[in-house]
Amino acid sequence: MRRYAWLIPAVLIVLSCPTLQAQETPEWDISGGYSYLKADLRGSSFHLNGGAASLTENLNSWFGGRIEVNAYQGSVSGTNVSAQTFTYGPVFTYRRFDKLTPFVHAQLGAIHASQGYLGISTSAFRFAMSSGGGVDVNINRKVGIRLQGDYLMTRFLGLRQDNIQGSVGLVVHLGKK
């Protein structure tokens, strides 16, 4: 216990620093960047690469709504496949620090997959649900780098697939609340 006694004053000093004051809340966040999908963790998993874009309306300093689109492409057993997700849901943000803005979200929507994705015979739209979170590393008041990771649940061929998606990209903060 004695070994960690220095943590108490260190935490108090860090929390009292002026750089840790609450952020201004932007009205909108627009994000775009690289996205990765590890599909079907329970079965024969495969990897797809692509892009992600999202638009968030911040209703107050901690709550908003986010629409997100991801598009993936790759080769599975010699077959070129693609998948796109379209989801919407609430986002909860903690705006206590100037440089970091952590968030969590839960979203519902759809996935569209091409023929060959998980062995499907024709392209199809199916239900998708994602939950996860991330952090915006703010470069300045207008621009940051977004790091995000999500669990993505989909249903094809009457079976549930557990997928992991991650993305990294730029986020632009517009307006002020």
Image: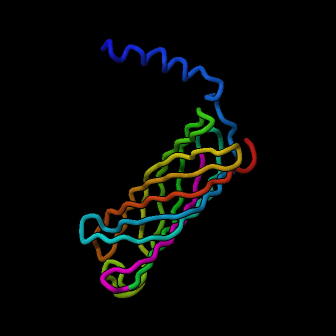
| Residue drawn where x is 50% and y is 71% of the image | 71
How far across and how far down the image is residue 68, in percent? 55, 61
**Quadrant (top left, top right, bottom left, bottom right) of the N terminus:** top left
User: In the picture shown, does residue 95 fall above or below 167?
Assistant: above
| Residue drawn where x is 45% and y is 70% of the image | 49
Residue 16 can be seen, yes or no: yes
Residue reaching furthest to the right: 175
| Residue drawn where x is 52% and y is 42% of the image | 102
User: In the picture shown, does residue 157 fall above or below 70?
Assistant: below
How far across and how far down the image is residue 103, in percent? 52, 44
Of 174 and 120, which appears nearest the observer? 174
**Residue 122 belongs to the span the image colors magenta:** no
How far across and how far down the image is residue 119, in percent? 30, 82
- Which residues are the magenta region? 64-79
**Residue 75 belongs to the span the image colors magenta:** yes
Of 136 and 25, which appears nearest the observer? 136
Magenta segment's dominant SS is: strand
By what rule are the colours in the image chosen? rainbow
How far across and how far down the image is residue 17, in percent? 61, 23
